[in-house]
Amino acid sequence: MLLSGLLGGAAIPAAAQTDAGANEALGVLRIDRNPVLLSMAGAGSAMTSTSQAYAAFGNPAAAAFSDKTLETAVSYASWSPHYTAASNIAAGVTGHLGQKVALSLGFARQGYQGLDFEPASGFKPSDMILRAGVGFKVSESLAIGVSAGYAKEALLSDYSLSAFSVSALAQYRIGGLNLVGGLVHLGGKVASDYSLPASVKLAADYGFEFGSSNLHVALDGDYYFSGNYSAALGLNFGIGGIGFLRGGYRYASANAAIPSGLALGAGLEWHGISLDVSFLTASETLGGSWMAGVGYRF
């Protein structure tokens, strides 16, 4: 469990993983690939006003409410620089078929340059995620979404963990309020012994309008089947439809896949082109992590 613990989203050594969460693997599934959500400490999955390019990793139901034709984005992150020194790249694309259906694809790869378990061979641990999602707008107020994918962690040159997982979410919106509920990353045992970091998710987002500016307040909560839990509160302040300031705090149980911490971020959007950056702090394992992404939607 040592290697799996180090390669998890929180980069927590196995010695710290006792009781709840001790038998979870592939914690990388819980890393936010979207710099907008990361800058809100993991809150914001119910938001429909931002790009839905990364919907395959998160909430494909929200993508069904988008009025865009195509949304695409790529991101790069330096993850847990003081522990695993991981380099994280991700890409996502969402295409909209008519007014009701959204199809999403996502790819992510993470390499751990700070870990060297086999110095003689030069092998470096890495992980990879492939996901696809579909969102369907049932009515003007209700949408459902399902995503599925494959994740693999190459821990040693001759040892790896892999699994398929499925998420199913429903989203209801009324006025400026968005509500989300569902199950995230359901799947079988990994290597016959470890469970995926599956959870019941509830999320909410409410938007306030101030002329050409707006403020979104988002709250996301997860209760993991392992007994872990987390809650994130995030703010997204849009200035004139061009600039964005973001922040959030995540509180998590001791052995959750992603630990507690503070997030800050900013963004720019102009004629469909977006640039977003996020920074994590107030976390022993993830402090100093950052992510930057660029996207385009029309």
Image: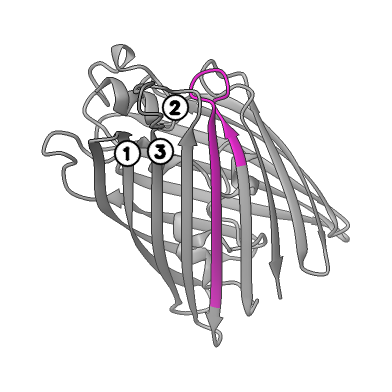
The one nearer the camera, 210 or 58, is 58
In the rendered view, tell whether residue 193 sits above or below residue 285: below
**Label 1: which secondary element:** strand
Residue 103 visible from this viewpoint: yes
Q: Tell which residue pokes out farthest to the bottom in this image.
A: 98
Q: Which residues are magenta?
A: 77-95
CA separation in Å, label 2 and label 3: 15 Å
Label 2 or label 1, whichever comes before in sequence order: 2
Q: Secondary structure at mark 3?
A: strand
Name the residue tied to disc 2. Answer: 10
Find residue 176 and report its horizontal and vertical position in percent: 65, 61
Q: Residue 125 vs residue 90: left or right? A: left
The disc at residue 154 is 1
Taking the spot 31% from the left edge, 24% from the top edge, the residue there is 3
Q: Residue furthest front?
A: 120
Q: Name the residue that disc number 3 marks.
A: 126
Asked if disc 2 and disc 1 are in contact, CB closer than 8 Å, the reply is no
The amino acid type found where label 2 is placed reads Ala
Q: CA distance from mark 1 to mark 3?
A: 5 Å
